[in-house]
Image (cartoon, coloured by chain):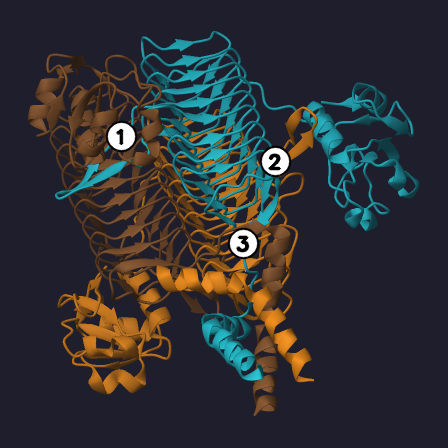
Chain colours: A orange, B cyan, C brown
Amino acid sequence: MPIRLGELAEQFDCELIGDASVIVDAVGSLPNAGPGALSFLSSSKFKKQLAATKAAAVILRAADAGDCPTAALITDNPYACYANMANVLCPPPIYEPGVHPSAVVAANATIDDTAHVAANAVVEDRARIGANSSIGPGTVVGPDCIIGDNCRLHANVTFVRSVSVGDRCIFHSGSVVGADGFGNAMTPDGWVKVPQVGGVRIGNDVEIGSATTVDCGAIDDTIIEDGVRLDNQIQIAHNVHVGAHTAMAAGCAIAGSAHIGKRCMFAGMVGMAGHIEVCDDVIVNGKGMISRSITEPGVYASNFPIEPVRNWNRLVAKVRRLDKLIERVGKLEKDSK
Amino acid sequence: MPIRLGELAEQFDCELIGDASVIVDAVGSLPNAGPGALSFLSSSKFKKQLAATKAAAVILRAADAGDCPTAALITDNPYACYANMANVLCPPPIYEPGVHPSAVVAANATIDDTAHVAANAVVEDRARIGANSSIGPGTVVGPDCIIGDNCRLHANVTFVRSVSVGDRCIFHSGSVVGADGFGNAMTPDGWVKVPQVGGVRIGNDVEIGSATTVDCGAIDDTIIEDGVRLDNQIQIAHNVHVGAHTAMAAGCAIAGSAHIGKRCMFAGMVGMAGHIEVCDDVIVNGKGMISRSITEPGVYASNFPIEPVRNWNRLVAKVRRLDKLIERVGKLEKDSK
Amino acid sequence: MPIRLGELAEQFDCELIGDASVIVDAVGSLPNAGPGALSFLSSSKFKKQLAATKAAAVILRAADAGDCPTAALITDNPYACYANMANVLCPPPIYEPGVHPSAVVAANATIDDTAHVAANAVVEDRARIGANSSIGPGTVVGPDCIIGDNCRLHANVTFVRSVSVGDRCIFHSGSVVGADGFGNAMTPDGWVKVPQVGGVRIGNDVEIGSATTVDCGAIDDTIIEDGVRLDNQIQIAHNVHVGAHTAMAAGCAIAGSAHIGKRCMFAGMVGMAGHIEVCDDVIVNGKGMISRSITEPGVYASNFPIEPVRNWNRLVAKVRRLDKLIERVGKLEKDSK
């Protein structure tokens, strides 16, 4: 959507250095932005890209404005400002209300008149879909799922059953919400499946990535609070509780009944054992393994970075012989007495 | 399904302390169970929840019966007993026999009269679906797939081709069974795809989680024996053999031609290299890396738990300088002689 | 497809020891090959299987020919030779041109007359599908996706939007290409979604595994070069660049804006941090964590193999007390002066 720089500056409370009447109609990266594009500089690490940019305007901090060869929008948080402005310039697509003739909707499902149900989607018994929400092609909304307003389920999403979702949530393709949790009781005859009768409750403004799975609770519900952001390929097991505004990067796996606080950030491939807690404001670095509860905010890690394999194998061998070294030191201490 | 406590006790061989005529019609957790619900106490860790429960009855061990404020069902294995009783109280849904008009079924596919094929499902050439099995909406059963009796493929499952499945198996949404294994031969012109011509053979009573992938064999079949339980987001590569009653939690990845014994239990995110073996009754803790064969039953591990990042970075630095420490100890030993 | 050994030898430049008129019509593993099957011996590790094979012919190195009880096809690279010959014997299925009546194709999409669109597939606005390409059942090709010639999208694949693909590419079931990258800006009110406006550009001869996800770029495109092979359950974040002929085994996760060179090989479950680079010809062992750029070709690793849990816990405890050991050595050194 084309908009004048002056309007953007006013709407998002930036100082504009440059011609307020210039119109931008796209976003662009500093190296590749075209003449009608808005760009941003969020870190001085990328400052060398600034001088050569052909963008119409760049969002940046006051300290960087002197080096900006184009119009500048000055703000303390260029990335957040860019996010807000980009949402104006590149709004999400709007879907025509209505149900595609190839979609199959149960007679007792309720679909708001303003909602969109795409080709070959399936909406099952007692499901409800709110105003302006869109259900992508091939997506299945199972029995007793309740979806609020302005939600978007992309193509080939599966809501299995008993999932309740607030407003303005996004579910990416391949995500599966509300499948049975992994509950099995060992008996002399092998595993007996434990029926999973809980549901999934999701707040407002939640985004769930591609191929991410959020299981139903075993008895009570699995809970994802407001504003949570889950990247792709994440596993949320039954009865996990994810606190508001917590974000996880791709490949994390959270075991059953784990409780995660608010505003936590897990980098990719973090694992968390079941039945433990992480307090608010905890950051875990990539591939970290949370095997005990964390009660203090802060940054945590547990991963070794790669090394050339020869060095690494030597290091592993030395670690495995640490007991020998400890013995040798003990002997030296004894001898020196 | 409502049932009298007396009937449950008799059917599952428990001692009942309380009124046998009381009817239960649901399950509940100790803190949240309503007055018609059956609950259970599987670990004394949760005993403090027992006193306040409003459940109609609680399944527990004899040792805990004295503290039970409600009717008690006494058993040695409360969790397994709960699983059995919950399957009576909350039986899986029953599907009407028949093929939904929007489903597409190949002329030469065979679908039992009692089976259910849901909206927008696709059943391809020569596929066979057994008695009382149900194929969920959007699910694709590819060519030459043979599905036994009483199986359930949830919504948006994909059986690619040549998958054979026994009875009473469950496949959750987003799971993919029978895709090509990862076979590539390096040549001077780049990778050449190695045709994957094997299939997948799955026994009885197997459950496969959401977004879990089980590849076809390269030449011979990939094999999953009876009673195996795979959680979500697990990768089973070509020609893997998973022994009966083995269970894996979410996020495990098993490389090609790995052979896993019976009754093994892998916690989440375990990795296993290809062409090696794990014997029966092996337990591997979360994030463990199996890079050599295991020939002795037992519990195995290889993961560091997280620490505050500052401590962790110091620890890594010290490990990397272990050779220096070893040298210093060597010098001390030499000097002390 | 049946073919004479003599023809195979000639077509792929092997020496044939045995009867050139023998016809093979299948492939088989050494232990299980039937009398009309072609087999191969790629590693002397499997040589004991050679003596008993019932295959019609075996592809192997000259050094192994003396032990071959059947006709032998002699080559320096038996596995690559097998791959080439197996592609002749077991060619991929051919699909009838045309769009299945249950598929839904946008009026402004362009589908080549020789292409195949299967049951319940959906092709959206402005999508283009090239000659001899096949779109599997339940697969969704989103707006502005351009697919070249001789590509195959298996069942239940999702191309979300703005994905461009060269020729001869394969996408396995459950893969999701072109979903939004994970872009979120923190504000005092929580996360603001950063619109993801880039696309995905994929070269020729690329194969993408089941449940693998390749996200759209944030502004510029995510790029997968020619000949790349990605196994199942891999995450490729926004703006990642994967160089030609690089292969990754299952479960890898590559964070945003990572740049990977040509001909790299990542084993399973490798993680790579964002905004760093790996040069050409780098091999990373299973579960390795790439947290810094790699500038030298070679083999890298960072994972501890499992041990019995008791040994492992002792080892972890010793590592955590390394500072104490270092202190003790320091004291000994001081005392010895």
Which numbered disc, 2 or 3, marks the residue that appears first in the sequence?
2
- Report whether B243 appears left or right of C109: right
Query: Which residue is disc 2 drawn over?
Result: B281
- Judge left or right: residue A295 versus residue B18: left
Nearer to us in this view, B198 or A332:
A332
Expressed as whole percent of the image width and height from the top left, the position of residue C58 reads 22, 24
The residue pinned by badge 1 equals: C41
Q: What residue type is disc 3 on?
A: Ser
Q: Which residue is mark 3?
A: B302
* Residue contact at pointers 2 and 1, CB within 8 angstroms: no
Give the alpha-carbon distance from disc 2 to disc 1, as whole Å: 33 Å
Crowd around label 3: few <14 · some 14–19 · many ≥20 (10 Å): many
Residue A74 drawn at (x, y percent)? 30, 80
Badge 3 marks a residue whose secondary structure is loop
Q: Nearer the viewer, mark 1 or mark 3?
A: 1
Q: Secondary structure at mark 1?
A: loop
Quarter of the image where one finds residue C195: bottom left
Q: Nearer the viewer, residue B196 or A276?
A: B196
Q: Are marks 2 and 3 in contact (CB under 8 Å)?
A: no
The chain to which mark 1 is attached is C
